[in-house]
Image (cartoon, grey):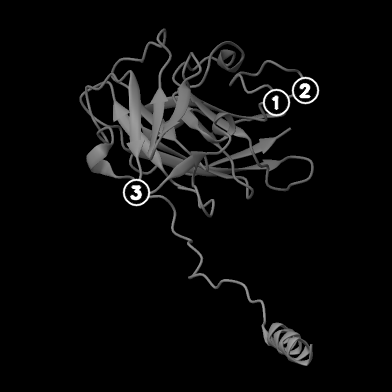
Amino acid sequence: MTRLFILLLGLFFLTGCAQITGLEGGEKDTTPPQVDSLHSSPMAATNYHPKSIKLTFNEWVKLNNVLKNILVSPPLAKRPKVTLKRKSVIFEFDKDEVLKDNTTYTINFGSAIIDLTEGNAAKGLTYVFSTGDKIDSLSVKGTVVDAFTRKPAENVSVMLYSNLTDSVVYKEKPYYLAITDKDGQFQIHNVRAGQFKAFALKDSDFDYMFSQVDEPIGFLPDLVTMGDSTPALNFRLS
């Protein structure tokens, strides 16, 4: 009985001295997913009419709110399908989609693709191709502010039209498109040379047209001439 008591007492002290500690891991992964170009659709392809586009990454990824984050310019007539297969993201055009001739298309993925473990977004990822024999390379940037508060206007569609009539914003989708960030700033890349009508629109129903009377809109009095030194475009939304 005495020996049993001593044994139990020893186990008690051993248990009391033991400390439970958490497992220590390595440094947090902050590197965003990188495109594996060898196993992806060709970048900056010309005379290209793809049915789908595949982007393969160097790690496992997942999709994040693709409808909100992915921006195609010029806008597509039909909604594309975006799916995930292992380390690859598949962007599939609708079977009834007809791509414009001699046009440079940009697909900006925003924060739609993130890694599986830490949620690091592949920000700045843009896929560019042309249905013609060259990639258009001009760009323009600018800002949008609220005319009443004079504060930067976020999530505003900035739209360029090749149709130069004033009513085009009511009737057609834009030829080029960008969305402002939290500072009211935007950039439109891969634009062809020429003249365009420009509008800024708080597009509440996301149809890329001025279709709601309560949608704030801004416009420029003059046409935008795209060239080697196009000045910044600044809009006041009212």
Q: Pointer 2: what residue?
A: 214
The one nearer the camera, 128 or 35, is 35
Packing grade of label 3 (10 A; few <14, some 14-19, many >=20) is: some
Q: Residue furthest top?
A: 96
Q: Indicate whether 21 appears above or below 125.
A: below
The one nearer the camera, 90 or 132, is 90
Measuring 33% from the left and 41% from the top, which residue is drawn there?
228
Q: CA distance from mark 2 to mark 3?
A: 45 Å
Q: CA distance from mark 3 to mark 1?
A: 37 Å
Q: Position of residue 3 (x, y in %)?
A: 73, 91
Residue 204: mark in rendering: 1
Q: CA distance from mark 1 to mark 2?
A: 9 Å
Q: Pointer 3: what residue?
A: 58
Q: Say if mark 1 contacts mark 2, CB within 8 Å.
A: yes
User: What amino acid is at disc 2?
Assistant: Asp
Measuring 41% from the left and 43% from the top, which residue is drawn there?
125
Q: Say if mark 3 contacts mark 1, CB within 8 Å.
A: no
Between tags 2 and 3, which lies in front? 3
User: What amino acid is at disc 1?
Assistant: Ser
Which secondary structure, mark 2?
Answer: loop
Q: Position of residue 29 (x, y in %)?
A: 48, 62
Between tags 3 and 1, which lies in front? 3
